[in-house]
Image (cartoon, helix red, strand yellow):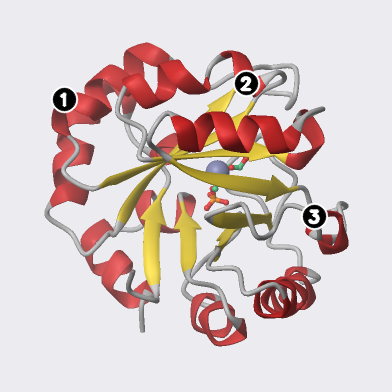
Amino acid sequence: MKNKMIAPSLLSADFGNLERDINMLNNSQADWLHIDVMDGRFVPNISFGFPVMKTVQQHAKKFVDVHLMIVEPEKYVEDFIAHGADLVSVHYEACVHLHRTIRLIQDNGAKAGVVLNPSTPVLMLEDIISEVDLVLLMSVNPGFGGQKFIENTYKKISETKDLILNNNSTALIQVDGGVNLENASRLFEAGADVLVAGNAVFSSENPEKTIELLKI
Ligand code: DX5
Ligand code: ZN
């Protein structure tokens, strides 16, 4: 996998023109499509589910990265993989049996990620780091796009990097929330491999150009 990857979040796309926005991403330098699924229980907002996944599956030509912000994600991971998810990330805080859920995702042929809320310490990953394909560090409290980046994330990136190296893990580090043209290069320098960007991409005048600039 390349480093300096960008995963635009469809949460900020225009749902009346979803096919158009997915095609724009197909033609851009975006590496992954980030799909934010919210259930109104794990997070205080409801986004979308399988009908949107069907449209993504029909049109997306990029790697599909599904971020589940739902309780009991183990009930749905197989369905998301059947709907085209290449990677499924589940929250540490939402999984009673995290190891089992990570295995379930991988046994169904997808990559598995674990997500930490801003208040969850990186050390909670010590006994799962060698099993996961990705660690997603939330740099806002999950639930909404367009929030302000939490600066403590830089420290968590370097702690995650150390944890990965000390355990010979191959996990990628992804950062999600409040990523923009001001902080992207510092996040990559700190050790992030994949940056999620919703608002920064879709509210810009030229989303394709913004994706390009986020990699510089
Ligand atoms: C937040 C979501 C993010 C969000 C990022 O709950 O997980 O993926 O859409 O959006 P921005 O980049 O607008 O903060
Ligand atoms: Zn997300």
In the image, is residue 123 above or below residue 18?
below
Relative placement, left or right, of 165 versus 6 is right
Ligand 2 is found in the corner quadrant, namely: top right
Report the Cα–Cα distance between label 3 and label 1. 37 Å
Image spot of residue 184 (x, y percent): 51, 75
Q: Where on the picture, by quarter, is residue 216?
A: bottom left
Disc marking residue 58: 1
C-alpha span from label 2 to label 3: 19 Å
Residue type for callout 1: Gln
Q: Secondary structure at mark 3?
A: loop
Look at mark 3 in the image and give the residue it sits on.
Answer: 127
**Residue 74 marker:** 2
Where is residue 176? Give x, y as percent.
58, 55
User: Between 142 and 205, which is closer to the camera in this rendering?
Assistant: 142
Kindly state the secondary structure of the residue where label 1 is placed.
Answer: helix
Question: How far apart, in angstroms, are the residues tagged by discs 1 and 2?
Answer: 24 Å
